[in-house]
Image (cartoon, grey):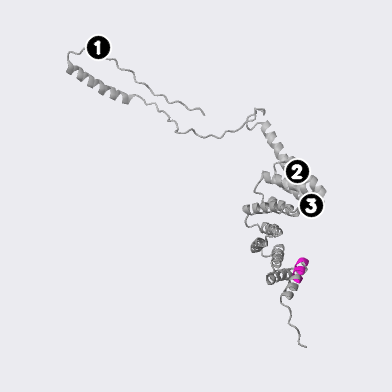
């Protein structure tokens, strides 16, 4: 923004009288009267205010305008038509996502993939459309495509907790535990009370052999969600791995109290009881 220059009014130079005055006192009196008259007259003149310049230039937000676009004024038919077209695309994308979700729930995975793909095409900057497409690809066992869509969702919205969490699970299934841990930690940085992310982080750490750290994650998941069966089973298994038999039995027993038919907990309980019997053998019977 160009600065407006501040102009200063220059006073006219007073001409000096070349002739020497004969009566100095008279000239002195006249000069004094002139000064008084000048001061008085100046108060009668209207003052022109001068707007001061700012000490620093004001910062303005620039708005880019596409020169190739129509010069139609705001509120014109052309502008309304463009906005309406964009709204229709968003609405169609949303409708397709809803239909895709229904298809996925009914087990029609290929149909869901097609619907989510079309939704992405209509609204490519919608992170939910990419996330939903990733879910459908994962159900198709198309892991590479699913990872690509999760990453695209995260490009658009880096704080997408569920995308971090699900991408981490895909990486765990591929044995890429270090990358998985990074995504679970990112999810928890965004949402520290996400019990699922704590459980999944514990699973990845346990697979890296960091069982003590995994126990802390499973415990936190259960603190946040006491009825989290998977986290309790993982905690029991971690205790079993560390030969903390009594604690493992406590966790498996709690699961079976809630869900007696939970087969993994029943197997874990059987193994824990077997280990406890080896640790505390029965005394020999008297003959």
What is the number of the mark on residue 139? 3
Magenta extent: 263-270
Q: CA distance from mark 1 to mark 3?
A: 107 Å
* In this view, the mark in front (2 or 1): 1
Left or right: 23, with 120 as reference point: left
Which residue of the protein is positioned furthest toward the bottom in this rendering? 287
Looking at the image, is mark 1 or mark 3 earlier in the sequence? Answer: 1
Is label 1 in contact with label 3 (beta carbons under 8 Å)?
Answer: no
Looking at the image, is mark 2 or mark 3 earlier in the sequence? Answer: 2
SS at mark 1 in the image: loop
SS at mark 2 in the image: helix
What is the number of the mark on residue 18? 1
> Which residue corresponds to mark 2?
119
* In this view, the mark in front (2 or 3): 3
Residue 75 is situated, as x and y percent measured from the top left of the image, at 64, 33
For mark 2, does the 10 Å Cα neighbourhood hold few (<14), some (14 to 19), or many (20 or more) residues?
many
């Amino acid at each position: 923004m160009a600065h407006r220059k501040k102009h200063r009014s220059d006073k006219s130079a007073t001409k000096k009288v070349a002739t020497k005055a004969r009566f100095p006192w008279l000239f002195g009196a006249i000069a004094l009267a002139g000064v008084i008259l000048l001061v008085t007259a100046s108060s009668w003149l209207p003052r022109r205010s001068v707007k001061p310049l700012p000490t620093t230039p004001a910062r303005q937000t620039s708005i880019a305008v596409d020169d190739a676009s129509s010069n139609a004024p705001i509120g014109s038919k052309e502008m309304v038509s463009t906005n309406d077209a964009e709204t229709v695309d968003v609405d169609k994308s949303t409708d397709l996502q809803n239909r895709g979700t229904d298809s996925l729930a009914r087990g029609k995975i290929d149909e869901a993939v097609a619907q989510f793909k079309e939704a992405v095409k209509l609204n490519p900057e919608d992170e939910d459309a990419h996330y939903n497409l990733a879910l459908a690809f994962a159900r198709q066992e198309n892991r590479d495509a699913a990872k690509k869509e999760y990453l695209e969702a995260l490009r658009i919205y880096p704080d997408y907790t569920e995308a971090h969490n699900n991408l981490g699970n895909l990486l765990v299934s591929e044995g890429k535990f270090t990358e998985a841990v990074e995504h679970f930690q990112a999810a928890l940085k965004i949402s520290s009370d996400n019990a699922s992310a704590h459980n999944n982080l514990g699973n990845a750490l346990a697979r890296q052999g960091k069982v003590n750290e995994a126990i802390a994650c499973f415990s936190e998941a259960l603190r946040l969600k006491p009825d989290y069966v998977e986290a309790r089973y993982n905690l029991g298994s971690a205790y079993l791995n560390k030969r903390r038999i009594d604690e493992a039995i406590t966790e498996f027993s709690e699961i079976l109290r809630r869900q007696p038919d939970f087969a993994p907990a029943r197997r874990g309980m059987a193994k824990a009881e077997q280990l406890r019997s080896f640790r505390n053998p029965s005394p020999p019977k008297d003959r």
